[in-house]
Amino acid sequence: MLISLALFIVCNLSMVCHAGEQCRFISKGVEYCFFTLNPLSEIGDGKIHVVRIDPSKATLKLLTASENDKRVRTTAQWCKDFGLVAAINAGMYGKDLFTNVGYLRNGSYIQNRQWNKKYKSVLAFDPLRPGIPPAIMVDLEEPDTKGRLKNYNAVIQNLRLIKGNGINAWETSDKRWSESAVGMDALGRILFLFCQSPYPMREFNEMIKSSGLGIVRMMHMEGGHIASLSVRTREISLDLAGSNESIITPDEVIKSQWPIPNIIGVKAR
C-alpha cells in the first residue's frame, strides 16, 4: 500500500511535508503534521493527523473527570479549561461513563485498580525520580513491567495495536472504525494519531508501520464517534471527531466531538 507521507523535516519554525503540505512546531517539543493514505477510504479524507511530543521538553498530563469536577468534556473543552496545546482520548471507558476499562492511576488517585487481562499495552509518564525516561510504553509480557511502572505518576492500560519492535498485534478482521491511537517511536517520543476515515485495524497498523514515523509501539485509545483529537494554539484550532462505526455513506460522517471523561493532554512548558 502506497502512502503519501508528510515527512517531519525541520525548516526554520515549520516543517515541510513531502506532499507539499505544511507541518509545524506548535510549542517547544511538540509538532503537528498529517499524511494521506492511498488508496483512500470511501469515507472521509483519508488523513492521519499526528501530534509528536518530546516528553523531555513538553509536559504530558493525564486528566480525568472523576478526579476533577465530574464534568465530561470534549477534547476541545479539555484544552480550553486546562491550558493544553493538544488532547486525545485516554482510553475506552465503562458503563459508568467515567472509568477507564484498563488500569488507570494518576499519582495517588487510582481510577481503576483492576488490570485488564486482555489489554497488553501500558503507557506511563511523569517520572517519580530522575534518571529514567520521561515516558515509556511497554508490553505487559516483558519482565518486571509492573515494577517499572511504579516509577511513574501516570499509568494507563489499553488495548495493544503494535507491540515491541513494531509487530502488528491485531488479528485480521473486516470491522473498521475511526481511530484515535497513541504510539511511541524509537527515540522515546509520544505520538497522538487520529484518522476519521474508517479502516480495519490490522490494515491501519500496517499503514502506520510503513509511514516513516518510526513507531515501535502503539495502543488503541478509542474508536468510532467517540475518537477525538484537538490541537489548540494561536495559529491552529483543530478539533477532530470520529464517525459512527456503522457508517454507510459519506453523509453520515460526524463532525462534532463527543464529551469524554479521560484524556491525555500536552501542556507547553
Image (spheres, grey):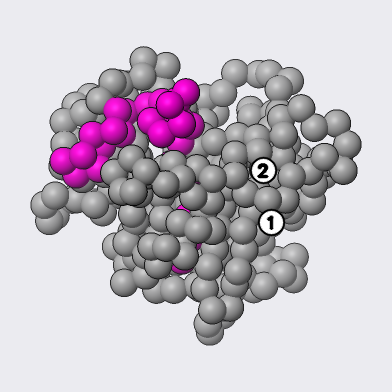
Front position in the image: 93 or 222: 93
Packing grade of label 1 (10 A; few <14, some 14-19, many >=20) is many
Q: Kindly check if marks 1 and 2 are in contact, taking CB atoms under 8 A apart as contact.
A: no
Judge from the rendering whether residue 150 lies leftward or rightward of residue 205; answer left or right. left
**Residue 135: x, y in percent?**
30, 49
Distance in Å between CA atoms under marks 1 and 2: 17 Å
Image quarter where the C terminus lies is bottom left
Q: Please state the extent of the stretch shown in magenta in the rendering.
A: 84-112
For marks 1 and 2, the one nearer the N-term is 1
- Most distant residue in the bottom direction: 12
Q: Amino acid at mark 1?
A: Phe
Judge from the rendering whether residue 154 lies leftward or rightward of residue 53; answer left or right. left
Q: Is residue 216 above or below residue 81?
A: above
Question: Element type at marker 2?
Answer: loop
The prevailing secondary structure element of the residues shown in magenta is: loop
Q: Which residue is mark 1?
A: 35
Q: Is residue 98 magenta?
A: yes
Q: Is residue 174 magenta?
A: no
**Residue 48: x, y in percent?**
66, 51
**Residue 68: x, y in percent?**
31, 48
Q: Which residue is mark 2?
A: 242
